[in-house]
Amino acid sequence: SSSLSKSINIFLGKVLVFPMEGSHWLNMEILIKALHAQGHSVTVVRANKSWYVKEESSHYRSITVNVTAGVDEQAAKIILQRLINAERGQSSVLNFLRLQMETFSMNTEVPKILVELATNMIQNQVLINTLKDSQYDLVLTDPCWGTGVLMAHYLQLPLVFNVRGVNGRDGHQSIAPSPTSYIPVTGSGFTDKMTYTDRVKNMLIHFFAQVHYNFFVRPIYQALCEKYFQTGVDFDELIQGADLWLMRVDFVFEFPRPTMPNVIYVGGFHCKPAKPLPQDLEDFIQSSGVHGVIIMSLGTLIKELPSEITAEIASAFAQMPQKVIWRHIGDRPVTLSNNTLLIDWMPQNDLLGHPKTRLFVSHGGTNGLQEAIYHGVPVVGLPVFFDQYDNLLRLQVRGGAKIVTLAKVDKDNNFLMALKEVLNEPHHKENMQKLSKLHRDQPMNTLDLATFWIEFVMRHKGAAHLRTESYRMPWYSYHSLDVMALLLAVVLLILFMTVALIRCLCFKMFFRQKFKHE
Amino acid sequence: SSSLSKSINIFLGKVLVFPMEGSHWLNMEILIKALHAQGHSVTVVRANKSWYVKEESSHYRSITVNVTAGVDEQAAKIILQRLINAERGQSSVLNFLRLQMETFSMNTEVPKILVELATNMIQNQVLINTLKDSQYDLVLTDPCWGTGVLMAHYLQLPLVFNVRGVNGRDGHQSIAPSPTSYIPVTGSGFTDKMTYTDRVKNMLIHFFAQVHYNFFVRPIYQALCEKYFQTGVDFDELIQGADLWLMRVDFVFEFPRPTMPNVIYVGGFHCKPAKPLPQDLEDFIQSSGVHGVIIMSLGTLIKELPSEITAEIASAFAQMPQKVIWRHIGDRPVTLSNNTLLIDWMPQNDLLGHPKTRLFVSHGGTNGLQEAIYHGVPVVGLPVFFDQYDNLLRLQVRGGAKIVTLAKVDKDNNFLMALKEVLNEPHHKENMQKLSKLHRDQPMNTLDLATFWIEFVMRHKGAAHLRTESYRMPWYSYHSLDVMALLLAVVLLILFMTVALIRCLCFKMFFRQKFKHE
């Protein structure tokens, strides 16, 4: 990484990685490659049912652990279909409830798999001995999935997060003060400027998310803690006790909010200048002339949408003067025009960085939006689930994106109108280019920054000096409710005694006067 | 600064500086020199009664403004004497009250001078026109003194702080969430681990500091806002609205706590490797042999202590096998031994970086302690006022310093015992060297970082994307009290209705049964 760190200590370490699947893995792999390039040795723990994490790689060794169920492509497809069905329900209240149920079941199914993975590791004495003998310097994990958090504690290793969210919430919510008055809860769809009604809703959503997490998700992880760890080990404290949080956002993207000393902002560390495209793609793009191209991808998880939606999207594209490159797997939409090229994989960063790219149609994953910011390309958003709506909202309020929800995409030409609006009103592009300028103007490259801090934790065997101990306080002490109760009691006592004294004096005076008069 | 920023934009800007006097100026001048070295032009506003800020410099132009009173050397000497007298009073309660009164009067005297300075500028139409015509890119100021804050608003310029404290409190208190449950208030003498009693005291100190500030200090500044600015301009909001806070601490020194995106930690940016010493000092140090030297300085403000204290200090030094270099102005202490060299100015950083330096006797200013950390030298602290006790406490709890208060320095050989303890117990030195290692292991040089961010604000005409708008919310909305009141009312209403319903049903059942029985 930086020349400064090298001059201090040339330290070649051993990193144990517990990744998350899907797009999170694509992001983690870039960090692994950077660590490998620095000379560190990396071991990745993967499930036998792993979807994206390959067993063989030139950048890491892998350890495969057997689990009975996995979060694989098939599982993702089923969940997606259920979510889309839920979102496209007729009644908006039913729709909302169905979405909650689906998210709910997904949020409890996945932790069970993750705890099974950790249990199978802990019960495999040969594996545990190998891990202990290997003397790793730290665990690097995405705390969206809890296995790495559990295993870092079991192996007593420093812990670094490559993080966007924890338990369905923005990662900050787990460690930094997050007043619901101006910090919108993930899934609320609010910005940092809320009306009174918004603030009431935001607090209610926060409350129900807390209840859901504490009664249905946390117990799954806590059960393992109680079975295999010392008494008193709390799963939440394990998360809060991480040495460093490499947060995959920056404040060009995220609303400004309180943060903590051990949060390092590395948003967009995967972005880089565009490389030349394959000749056939380049030829197709050049054929677009002055109009340029639109590119569309719904990310790693979503490869296929219901056919009535794809037909609507294809017919909207057909009416545009631009050429379109669409990452689409599945049946060819019937309304597809010959200005649209379907491909099953795209070099997204290279396409976004192409000078002829005019617009990015995206599902709103953090990776893709940070790339859009980096290259200054305006966005039409088709959010599906997780934080995608909230991510797109951050660009929309900054005037660089327009959101069309899946539930409304095939109504009243919504999608076509959004394409036209973002392309024809130049402020969308100008705003994205302003964000791009801010994002690129940083004191150091964010991938170098991430590597520096991982190495820092290895050099110093943790980063305890950056971590508050406040998490260990009971909530009523943290918020000083116990102190305020005492002070209130004292004030009330003084008030009461003053009133009593006055009454007593008045009574005496009255009595004496009465006595005099009589 | 960094090569990255240069490649983005070579921007030569104009910086208008409102410095604070004394040691704060020594620190600010280093930043000014760095900006000047980058090619920016710097203008410094100084009072005609300025104590440290020279009219002529090769690094900056200056503008001199007349004021009737100044914070000069004489004023500082009087305040110091009053504070020492107060601290050395007989009764500890009286002592405490006197200290409060002295601090109180100092805290209201100084803002009056600062507001006079701003008023004289605003009323000088020629000066204001010159300032406007000069088209500065930003105001750089130390918000410990409010003139720069007022003038940045008047001139409508971006605002950057080089900051340690604001209105007698740690700078964080003005912008970052600071729960009194684990954030000790400046002057409380607590650490980040407090008992219940400590937490009660901490909240009370916080409360009285708030009352004092809001009723006695803020009105002085607010009066100018109301006279010269648009209605609705609030002095506190001007402070909270600064684009960037270059905070003169780091988390090797400061307890970990919540922070904000626009706080950049530049603690110790003035530290650098030691340069060779003048020959006479070097000879004196070499004559110390294996025992090495003790160096003592009480900083910029305090040049002379009462003679009974200096006599005690001198006689303690006389009993040590080390040689001593003591920055001391005033009468030669009668008990001085020939192992002690009195000098009236010392190259402090070069002395602290000398391999034979064993111990630093310091008043606990932030500058000196960051230098002690940088060079890994243990400290005996003689705090006088401001944040000095709190600063020293941070090193004491990390095992690198020992505090002796002025009130107790001449009793029971306290000072001598502290010297011996810190010198003879090696963990003091080991701990300071551990802190030094952590402090030096940063992704980039902090002076470069400070320069980068000042240039960032000039390039982008502010840094609004890093600043929350939460400060504009009323306090009850910020803390969601209005939302909680509604939710509580709803819960109570539901409870009340449920109870009413149950009572009604019971009554009916009872009545029907009674009716049946009859």
Image (tube, coloured by chain):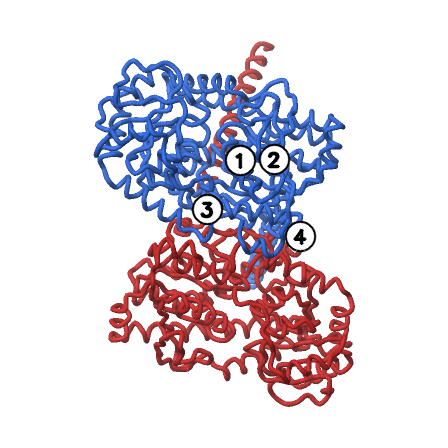
Chain colours: A blue, B red
Q: Position of residue B305 (x, y in %)?
A: 63, 82
Q: Residue at x 35, y 48 (%)?
A: A437
Q: Position of residue B338 (x, y in %)?
A: 73, 87
Q: Mark 4–mark 1 contact, CB under 8 Å?
A: no
Mark found first going from the N terminus, 1 or 3? 1
- Density class for disc 1 (Cα within 10 Å; few <14, some 14-19, many ≥20) is many
The dot on residue A257 is 3
Mark found first going from the N terminus, 3 or 2? 2
Q: How many marks?
A: 4
Viewer-proximal residue among B470 and B53: B53
User: Which residue is identified by label 2?
Assistant: A17
Secondary structure at badge 1 equals helix
Chain of the residue displaying label 2: A
Mark in the foreground, 3 or 4: 3
Q: Mark 2–mark 4 contact, CB under 8 Å?
A: no
Are labels 3 and 2 on one chain?
Answer: yes
Mark 4 residue type: Tyr
The dot on residue B196 is 4
Are labels 3 and 4 on one chain?
Answer: no
Mark 1 residue type: Met
Residue A216 seen from this side: no
Mark 3 residue type: Arg
Q: CA distance from mark 4 to mark 1?
A: 43 Å
